Image: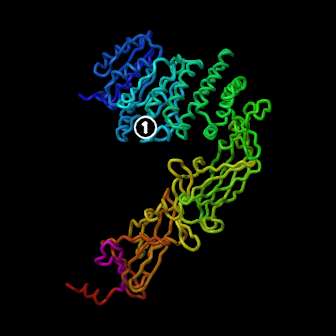
């Protein structure tokens, strides 16, 4: 008999009242109970968890299996016991405090099976003030790996694992660790998995902070437990990942997250223990760190590691205190600008008695860029942009902001000057008013006929950026994702008169980032699908004017450029311009053809706009002929016989003899 699709393993210790919701959330999964088994291991609870599990086992007799054992002191032993009894194709580890969203397991299993992946991360959401990892959940990733994503930044086991992977690696949680046991389980699984999937568009797991802060990960303190598992993770990377960018990518996590957490605990310990632990920590991280990693690290991380490597205990304690105070204040650290570089004013900056390199404080490449577009509008062949942009913590002095146009395919770039405008009071709502940016505004008009160093911009996709500069520092940033509510991001195609011929120019925002791009020459936004002739009829107020109704989603075109062009097949031509008026998102377009002005003939035609043309629909066969007099003689216009699917209008003078004969005919 085939086993279940998923075995959910729950290690439970004193988990009341959370365990009830935890189990229920699994039992109610949309994947169905036939596809599930729950293996709950009570690790010597004393608060009623054991009894509640037994009650739930009676409520779900074919779904829930409960094991009881003496307290082991951590989650490893109960998780291992559950894994030993698991029969599912996949295994999901769920903490007794947490619970699943209704479709979590169904979505994760589908993701794994569709993509043939061994591990699936479902988006985690913090509850009750508990912080959940976020950086790896910015978008769905059907097939990724540990080196080309941020999945390594979550090493907890609350994930879907293909059981064959775990058994092939003989993976179990180490039982000699109070914390970090999950890293030594998940880390090897990541490294040997046949790809990894990430679900970011559905909240799968609710990560709960207990009211008594009794979560195992929240109540295991001190630096010693962390200094026990960290060397083993370092050894894992040294043994299984060759030197190079891949190892550096994983080392980044341990050199920042683990080191910072350990130091946060170190400050509360006796001086002798602090000194001993710091020496050991410096030894542990030495094999992972090298100068080439600095580009990956924040200035704070570089400074922290420098102090650790040089066992500068007093300076480290002051840095931890400084970071803690920084978090409470909610104000970003001021910077020193010197020689076109920005240095954070962290403790001991340029203190000659410490001799810490400036590189440990350099934040130039990581300066925040703040920007907003307040106007983005095409008028004729010119794009008008206004807004503001500034570098966070850099006063707007000696401003050198420019607009940058970059063609996506070729990489061709053009820079255009902007007019700098005053922005009094800008920044007073951030950082408690510590930083104000008085000249951050910009205005610029981009004429597509001259923007390419005096020539017209070639066809292509032109991404729009600001190169924001002040005090000798500059950063380029795409713009548009921050804009006023009145600034539309919807694609708007204009037909413009450029150098004597019509060109299609579309201003739109990219998906998913929402930045502005100019599409010149229909690279993404074709003109033909945006226009069609929908109706042909006699005008209600003018019985000799043939009226064409036109559906048009173009944002604009030159006056008179859109017109119905008629030909009589003998060299005769006539053109009738469209008249447009805005109505909601579209233009209401009408073209009227005064047939009484047409010479006699069989007229065919098209709707034209520059080099684009659309067929006119056939004149309805049941359309009543239009009649009028010209120089006292009767004329008519009617649908041509046998016109088929093409527009054909017969204009002719009435043959009086034949007309009289038809009337006299009995």
Q: Quadrant of residue 528?
A: bottom left
Percent of width and height locating residue 15 = 45, 16
573 vs 380: above or below: below
As drawn, is 49 to the left or to the right of 323?
left
Query: 608 or 149: which is nearer to us?
Result: 149
**Helix, strand or loop for disc 1:** strand
Label 1: how many residues lie within 10 Å, few (<14), some (14-19) or many (20+)? many
Q: Is residue 487 visible?
A: yes
Please tell me which residue lies in front, 170 or 650.
170
Q: Position of residue 268 (x, y in %)?
A: 65, 17
Say above or below: 40 vs 288. above
Q: Nearer the viewer, residue 83 or 44?
A: 83
Q: How is the image coloured?
A: rainbow
Judged left or right of residue 168, residue 302 is: right
Locate the N terminus and report the quarter of the image it occupies: top left
State the residue position of label 1: 196
Is residue 93 covered in magenta?
Answer: no
């Amino acid at each position: 008999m085939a086993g279940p699709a998923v075995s959910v393993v729950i290690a439970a210790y004193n988990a009341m009242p959370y365990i009830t919701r935890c189990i229920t959330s699994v039992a109610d999964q949309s994947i169905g109970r036939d596809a599930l088994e729950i293996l709950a291991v009570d690790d010597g609870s004393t608060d009623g968890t054991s009894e509640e599990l037994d009650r739930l086992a009676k409520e779900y007799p074919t779904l829930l299996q409960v094991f009881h054992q003496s307290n082991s002191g951590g989650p490893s032993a109960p998780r291992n016991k559950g894994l030993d009894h698991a029969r599912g194709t996949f295994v999901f580890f769920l903490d007794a405090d947490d619970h699943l969203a209704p479709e979590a397991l169904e979505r994760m299993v589908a993701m794994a099976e569709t993509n043939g992946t061994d591990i699936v991360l479902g988006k985690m959401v913090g509850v009750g003030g508990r912080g959940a990892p976020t950086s790896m959940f910015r978008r769905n990733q059907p097939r990724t790996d540990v080196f080309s994503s941020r999945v390594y930044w979550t090493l907890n086991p609350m994930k879907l694992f293909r059981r064959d992977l775990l058994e092939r690696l003989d993976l179990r949680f180490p039982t000699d660790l109070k914390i970090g046991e999950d890293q030594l389980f998940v880390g090897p699984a990541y490294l040997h998995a046949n790809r990894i999937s990430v679900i970011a568009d559905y909240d799968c797991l609710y990560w709960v902070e207990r009211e008594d802060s009794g979560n195992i990960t929240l109540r295991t303190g001190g630096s010693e437990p962390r200094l026990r598992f960290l060397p083993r993770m370092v050894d894992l990377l040294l043994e299984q990942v060759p030197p190079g960018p891949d190892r550096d990518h994983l080392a980044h996590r341990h050199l920042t997250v683990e080191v910072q957490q350990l130091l946060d605990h170190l400050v509360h310990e006796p001086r002798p223990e602090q000194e001993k632990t710091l020496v050991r920590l410096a030894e542990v991280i030495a094999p992972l760190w090298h100068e080439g990693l600095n580009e990956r690290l924040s200035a704070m991380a570089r400074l922290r590691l420098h102090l650790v490597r040089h066992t500068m205990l007093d300076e480290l304690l002051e840095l931890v205190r400084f970071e803690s105070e920084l978090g409470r204040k909610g104000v970003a650290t001021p910077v020193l600008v010197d020689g076109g570089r920005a240095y954070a004013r962290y403790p001991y900056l340029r203190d000659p008695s410490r001799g810490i390199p400036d590189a440990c404080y350099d934040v130039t490449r990581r300066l925040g860029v703040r920007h907003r577009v307040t106007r983005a509008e095409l008028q004729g062949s010119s794009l008008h942009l206004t807004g503001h942009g500034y570098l966070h913590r850099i006063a707007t002095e000696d401003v050198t902001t420019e607009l940058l146009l970059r063609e996506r395919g070729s990489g061709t770039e053009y820079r255009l000057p902007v007019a700098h405008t005053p922005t009094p009071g800008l920044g007073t709502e951030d950082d408690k008013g510590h930083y104000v940016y008085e000249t951050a505004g910009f205005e610029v008009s981009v004429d597509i006929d001259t923007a390419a160093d005096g020539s017209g911009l070639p066809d292509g996709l032109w991404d729009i950026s600001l190169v924001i500069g002040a005090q000798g520092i500059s950063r380029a940033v795409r713009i548009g994702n921050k804009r006023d509510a009145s600034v539309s991001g919807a694609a708007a195609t204009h037909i413009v008169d450029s150098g004597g011929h019509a060109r299609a120019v579309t201003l739109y925002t990219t998906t998913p980032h929402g930045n502005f791009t100019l599409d010149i020459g229909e690279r993404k936004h074709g003109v033909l699908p945006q226009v069609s002739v929908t109706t042909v009829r006699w005008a209600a107020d003018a019985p000799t004017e043939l009226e064409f109704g036109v559906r048009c989603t173009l944002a604009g075109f030159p006056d008179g450029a859109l017109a119905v062009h008629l030909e009589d097949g003998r060299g005769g031509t006539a053109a009738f311009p469209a008249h447009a008026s805005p109505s909601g998102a579209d233009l209401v377009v009408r073209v009227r053809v005064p047939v009484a002005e047409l010479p006699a003939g069989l007229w065919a035609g098209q709707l034209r706009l520059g080099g684009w043309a659309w067929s006119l629909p056939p004149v309805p066969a049941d359309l009543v002929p239009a009649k009028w007099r010209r120089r006292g003689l009767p004329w008519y216009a009617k649908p041509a016989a046998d016109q088929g699917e093409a527009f054909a209008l017969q204009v002719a003078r009435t043959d009086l003899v034949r007309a009289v004969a038809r009337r006299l005919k009995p």
